[in-house]
Image (spheres, coloured by chain):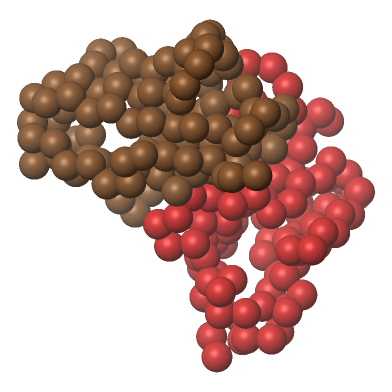
Chain colours: A red, B brown
Amino acid sequence: DAKTTQPTSMDCAEGRAANLPCNHSTISGNEYVYWYRQIHSQGPQYIIHGLKNNETNEMASLTITEDRKSSTLILPHATLRDTAVYYCIVRYLSGAGNMLTFGGGTRLMVKP
Amino acid sequence: NAGVMQNPRHLVRRRGQEARLRCSPMKGHSHVYWYRQLPEEGLKFMVYLQKENIIDESGMPKERFSAEFPKEGPSILRIQQVVRGDSAAYFCASSPQNEQFFGPGTRLTVL
C-alpha cells in the first residue's frame, strides 16, 4: 500500500470547518483513499472513502486532487466530540492484502 | 444490528499465562481482522481470517500467537506464555467485503 503523510496535529474552533490534509504521492491507479478516526482509546471508526471523485456522507466530505496525489477530509461544522486522531489510508479493495495500514494520523483538537 | 463485539474488554494476566481474546463479528460478516495497538502508537495489522481459514497472517509474531475463526462461534486470538511486551490494546474488525468495522478492543495488561 502507498504511504501517506499527514500533519501530526491540528486545532479547530468549535463550529468551524476542519480541513485535514493528506499526501499520498505514490498512490496507484487502483488504490482507494480511506479515512478513519479513533476517539480516545476506542476502536477506529470508518468515516469515508473515495477513488477519484469527491465524496460526501453524513459525517464528512472528501476531496481528492485531480492527480490523486493528495486529499482533504472536511468536517463542515466541527464539534467537541470530533476531537480524535484521524487516519488517512490508501489501500486496494480486494485480495489477501487488503488490511488497513495505519500511520501516525493527525490529532485534531476541537476547542470551544 | 449489533456492532462488532469483543470480550473481555480488560484482561490482566501474569507473565507465562495464556490470554484468549474473543471477537464476534457483525451479523453477516465473514471477514475478521485483528490489529494490535501499543501505547501511543497506531494500529498494526496482525491477521486476516475468513470462516475456518487464515488468509493473511503476515503481521502475527511467529511464536506464541495464534488465531482462529471457526465455522460456529467467535474468532479467537490466543497468546500463550504472555510477556510484558504483549501489553496492548487488541482490536478486531469485521467486514462484509471492503469497509472494516471495529470493535471496542480488549486491553491486555501483563503483570
Question: Along the line of sight, which residue is nearer the eye, A107 or B107?
Answer: B107
Residue A88 shows up from this direction: no
- Residue at the farthest top position: B53
Q: Position of residue B24 (x, y in %)?
A: 49, 32
Q: Residue at x 73, y 22 (%)?
A: A94
Q: Choose top left, top right, bottom left or bottom right for residue B75.
A: top left
The relative height of residue A41 versus residue B99 in the rendered view (above or below) is below
Q: Choose top left, top right, bottom left or bottom right for residue A28.
A: top right
Q: Residue at x 53, y 50 (%)?
A: A44
- Residue at the farthest bottom position: A112
Q: Residue at x 91, y 49 (%)?
A: A53
Identify the image quadrant of the N terminus of chain A.
top right
Residue A68 shows up from this direction: yes
The relative height of residue B62 versus residue A67 in the rendered view (above or below) is above
The relative height of residue A82 versus residue B110 in the rendered view (above or below) is below
Identify the image quadrant of the C terminus of chain A.
bottom right
Q: Position of residue B7 (x, y in %)?
A: 36, 39
Q: Choose top left, top right, bottom left or bottom right for residue B111.
A: top left
Question: Along the line of sight, which residue is nearer the eye, B17 or A77?
Answer: B17
